[in-house]
Each structure stands twice: as structure tokens, then as C-alpha cells.
Image (tube, helix red, strand yellow):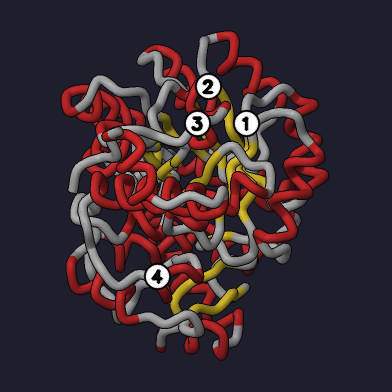
Amino acid sequence: MSSPSSSHPALHTRICELLGVQFPIVQTGMGWVSGAALTAATSAAGGFGILAAATMTLDELDAAIQDVRSRTDRPFGVNMRADQQGVEATADLVIRHRVRLASFAGPPKRDLIKRLQDGGVLTMPTIGAPRHAAKMAEWGVDAVIAQGHEGGGHTGPIPTSLLLPAACAAATIPVLGAGGFSNGRGLVAALAYGAAGIAMGTRFLLTKESTVPDHIKAAYVKASLTDTVVTHAIDGAPQRVIRTSVIDRLERANPLLRLPRALANALGFRHLTKTSLVDFIKEGLAMRKSRELTWAQLAMAANAPMLTRASMVDGKLEVGILPTGQVVGVIEQLPSVAEVLADIMRGAEETLTRLTGGSPAADRIRERA
């Protein structure tokens, strides 16, 4: 499927200028999912891809950045956890490689924002409340992603249709909408709310370039609009996932009985990411303080990456979790990233033409005249 040969002026937004991209569409940084292949494919096709650094060592991230650069000369970003021990070293690596943007699942500290921006890197955190958009703009970030309740993974209580226009009204910087987007009509709706574009995770997870095992993708495709659940049982924070027997067991289990397994998996994640025991403990204490977690919740929070890895990397559906947006219920195909972007842009142009009283057929006749 070829890309649209032209774009409606409304589809060239502030985020296109800021990020240096053709389309106002961002692929979010999903742990264990957003690797070099997916990120490069998104950027090469006209969107903006983001590598997920939180589940990588510095050496792995360094190699992934170089891998993306070997596949495309288009700009891309890196997602990192603001509360992760050693995040400054990750930021310095991003600066050294002259990556266009650093994104964050939560609010980064002001000194980290300044560190990145002084190094020529744009910053873009994800927010879940209008006041957070205003605060991040005041702290000097370049853009924000406003993720509504429909979004996958950690998510807030406000639906996208209410959060997005309120966030746009609260901040003068570009705002991207996330949570529930997968097609051109959604992109136009986001623009109507005042957004500068959309950010998607689930739609990109379910593409040919995504390295998630095929049978795991099949489980996603089978899910309906009512097959997801927001649970606190994974790490103490609300997280939207596909409801499976694993989730049912976690929700029924006594927290004390979950603790030993959580600790074992947390230590396994420390080994994979080559985090020293001292740094691991420091990070846990910082996480407990910033998120006000109990010790049991802290163990589960450290355990969560391993549960995601079990499904997204190892393909173990019976022991893993499947983070997802509610939009999974309307996704039935596994196209290429280029096909996804082309379809969204084509649908957006058709929607804008319909709303302004024209038709694609009439436009083509006028072009030939």
C-alpha cells in the first residue's frame, strides 16, 4: 500500500515541524516491544518511532540506536523511565547520539529536562490529567502525550474524549492524544479536540515489524472491546491488560502469597538489565517514595517487567501479561507499519473532505480539469 501522494493542510501540524516528520503520528515506546526494527519502520514510513530504553542495558540501547540509524536516516526518539536508577547515564547516551526526542511514561525531574534540552534533545512526557499538562509545560517540556483511560499499560481514570481537549486548553505546547486511536477518523477527532496528532502503542504492536511472537499477536487480535481490564494486581498501579487466567489469578491471590514470586522475578529483571544490587535497592527505595508504594506493591512493581517479558519476548502466554489499549477490540489485521500509516492518512483525508462538503471523487475530477 503506497503512502498518500498529498496531505490535507490540516494534517501538517506543529508536531510534524517539531519532530521533523511527514505525518502527525507517534509510535510509543513499549517495553520489550519497541525495538530497532519497529522504531525504524515507523520513522522510515513517515511517522515518529520511539525506542523503549527502560528494559535495555546501556550497551543494548547503544546498539539499538545504531541499528535504527542503519535502517533509516529519519528522526526517532528514546523512551526512558524518569525514576529509573542511572537515568542520567541514559540521557547522556541519547544526547551523545543526537537522538531527536526523549519521552517518558511519567513526569521527569526539572533537572533531567534541562540536561536533555541543553544537549539538544526534545522532551515529551505522558500525562493523565489536565493539570499535569500545565505543570509539564511550565517545567519546559516541548510536548506532551495525553493518554486517556482507554490507553494500554499504566493508565488514568479520565477518558480520552474529556482529557484531550482539557489538556490542550491547559497547555500551549503541542499535545498528542493517546488511548483509543487506530484510524484516520480518530486522527481527525484528535485534531478537532485541539491535539497536534496522535500516539499509538497497540496498533503498532500488531504489525508485521513487531517482534512479538505470532501466537501472542493472535491472542491480541482475538480480543474484543470488552476483553480488557484495568487491574491493580500487577504492580499496585492501574494497568490495562487483556483479561486472562493469569490476571484472574493475580487478582484473587493473597498479596503475601504473591510476594515470593514477585521478588524472584524482580531479581531476575535486575540480572537481565545488569543492575547492581546497590542500584537495584536504591531504585526500589526511590520508586517507593515517589509512588507511595507499600513493600508488597514495590515487589510487584519490580516484578511487572518480567511478566511482560514472558509474553512479549518468550511467548509464554500462560505466565505473562498482555498490556493493551481498549482499541485492541477493533484491530483485526496485522499489516505492515507503512500500511498502517498510509491507511490512517488516507482515512483522515477522506474524513476531512467529507466534513468540508467534498468527496474524493470530486476532488480527483477537479484535479484533472
Label 1 close to label 2 by CB (< 8 Å): yes
Q: In terms of secondary structure, where does tag 4 sit?
A: loop
Quadrant of the image containing the C terminus = top left
Q: Label for residue 322? A: 4
Q: In terms of secondary structure, where does tag 1 sit?
A: loop
Which residue matches tag 1?
143
Sequence order check, earlier mark of 3 and 2: 3
Label 4 close to label 3 by CB (< 8 Å): no
Sequence order check, earlier mark of 1 and 3: 3
Which residue matches tag 3?
9
**In the displayed structure, would residue 258 be above or below residue 23?**
below
Residue 113 is situated, as x and y percent measured from the top left of the image, at 64, 22
Crowd class of label 2 (few under 14; some 14 to 19; many from 20; radius 10 Å): some
Q: Nearer the viewer, mark 3 or mark 2?
A: 3
**CA distance separating discs 4 and 2:** 32 Å
**Of residues 145 and 279, the one drawn nearer to the viewer in this rendering:** 145
**In the displayed structure, would residue 159 be above or below residue 362?**
below
Q: Label for residue 18? A: 2
Question: Which kind of residue does numbered mark 4 sit on?
Answer: Leu
**CA distance separating discs 1 and 2:** 9 Å
Question: Which kind of residue does numbered mark 2 sit on?
Answer: Leu
**CA distance separating discs 4 and 1:** 28 Å
| Residue at x 53%, y 24% (from the top left corner) | 88
54 vs 168, left or right, is left
Q: In terms of secondary structure, where does tag 2 sit?
A: helix
